Amino acid sequence: MKLTDFRGLLQYIPQFREKTFVIGLDGAVVTGENFSNICMDIAVLRSLSIRVVLVHGASAQIRSLAQEQQIAPSNLDGSGITNAETLKLALTAANRLTHEILEGLAANDLRAACTNSIIAHPLGILQGIDHQQTGKVERVDVEFLQTLLENGIIPVLPPLGVDGDGKTFRVNSDSIAVAVAEALKAAKLMFITSHDGIIVGDHVIRQMPVADLESVLAMQRSRVHPELLSKAIHAVAACKAGVPRVHVLNGSTEEGLLAEVFTNEGVGTLVYANEFQQIRRAMKKDVRAILNLTKTSVESEELMKRTRPMIEKQLGDYYIFEIDKNQVACVALHTYPEHSKGELACLYVSPSHENQGIGRKLIQFVENRARDLGLSELLTLSTQAFSYFQSKGGFAEGSPDDLPPARREKYDQSGRNSKVLVKRLKPTTPTPAVDEVKK
Ligand SMILES: CC(C)(COP(=O)(O)OP(=O)(O)OC[C@H]1O[C@@H](n2cnc3c(N)ncnc32)[C@H](O)[C@@H]1OP(=O)(O)O)[C@@H](O)C(=O)NCCC(=O)NCCS
């Protein structure tokens, strides 16, 4: 891990300390080559005081066990009918897997325990079909799980439930993960699968608000990859039950679990409930973020180079767009009140948040500030995004003569030959104070 990665990671540590992550592991992931690395990633989460619950599936193992024993299972994933023979297979497969997980965790000095904390009842007769020993979660024994978590023990939950009479039912592991995440008020539910994320058509979804995924399921369900349909359905169910973030990622990606948790970009799919967005004034602690955010654009000459002292000197001009306390975009408004002009500068949106209208929101925000300050013209200089400012921001092409004299001098010295874009501002009613602009 690079030092810069480590710094990026540090910002998340207070955010997740003592929070609960429920991790749903597909059975195929547990027997996959990367499983020992996943256990190491879990050890990192635990070392940062993140509480972890593991829920695992077993369909891949039920399938191979059935082949070995030449039995045709009545269902694999715990959502169809479970006859007595299939329940037997599920018990053998699940117990083996639970044990493999316990072994993997033990190899990383992690304490873990298999529990009977999922209280289930029969799924019953649906549309005239008796689902026999398929169960659904009736209740999660929260107290039991919390006792383990408080003592630093990772609960490991198989895709099975028991009722008050001690009868066992086969329960779909995704539905157990959702029920547990809801009951424990988890900060995250992470599904680790054999795919790179939720695939719709040919594309892996990177980030999606739950309402959008819900409408994909309603209108384009057939476009969702069949092996990820259950994840998509359960991701929506979890967000609607109050889990703020659901991730779906590939178990064979090295350090994938950590990258998903500790980077803004992530590696899989993030489905989120309500996010907290705000535009706020930049503070001294944001200078590093501004430098880091804009680094690649400075290198590619989209943005002019700004040093730390330059930013610090004009810090009052800078604004940050943050999502859930992560800085994802920035912009500045430099003013020339004697000429009634303002300059929109240093507009940058992180690649992981492009094309979500954040750039436009920041242009609109700067425009409103400029109006509130009584400025009549907004300028911006651009080498590569001039058509963006024209088509999305309503700017028109101007010339260096539009710049106030002091700015013009710097322009001539820089040799960047940026295009100058201009927008006349009509006065409107004042906008709310900066820190109230929340979406
Ligand atoms: C340019 C930039 C600010 C756009 O931010 P954004 O939040 O992704 O933009 P929005 O979501 O508001 O708008 C997206 C639209 O703009 C278009 N767009 C993005 N960058 C563009 C560019 N350089 N030129 C023309 N159009 C562009 C997108 O194709 C998309 O079009 P659509 O809505 O028709 O699909 C961002 O890409 C960026 O930070 N670029 C690097 C830095 C830079 O050039 N800054 C401007 C100089 S001050």
Image: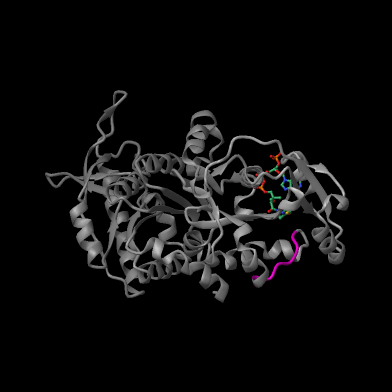
In the rendered image, the quadrant that contains the N terminus is bottom right
Main SS type for the magenta part? loop
Q: Quadrant of residue 106?
A: bottom left
Q: Is residue 106 left or right of residue 276?
A: left
Residue 266 is at least partly visible in this image: no
In the foreground, 150 or 16: 16
Quarter location, residue 233: top left
Q: Position of residue 222 (x, y in %)?
A: 54, 33
Q: Is residue 43 visible?
A: yes
- Left or right for 284, reference 49: right
Q: Is residue 304 magenta?
A: yes
| Residue drawn at x 40%, y 48% as measured from the top left | 244
Question: Could you say where residue 277 lies in the image, as x and y percent from the top left?
Answer: 50, 48
Residue closest to the far top: 128
| In this view, 219 is above or below 46 | above
Q: Is residue 313 magenta?
A: no
**Residue at the front extreme?**
338
- Horizontal relation, residue 342 to residue 186: left or right: right
* Magenta span: 303-308
Query: As rendered, which of 167 and 327 lies closer to the eye?
Result: 327
From the viewer's perspective, tell me whether residue 324 is left or right of residue 223. Answer: left
Is residue 218 depicted above or below 185 in this figure?
A: above
Q: Horizontal and vertical percent for residue 422?
A: 79, 45
Describe the colour scheme in one phrase: one colour
Give percent across and percent down for residue 387: 79, 44
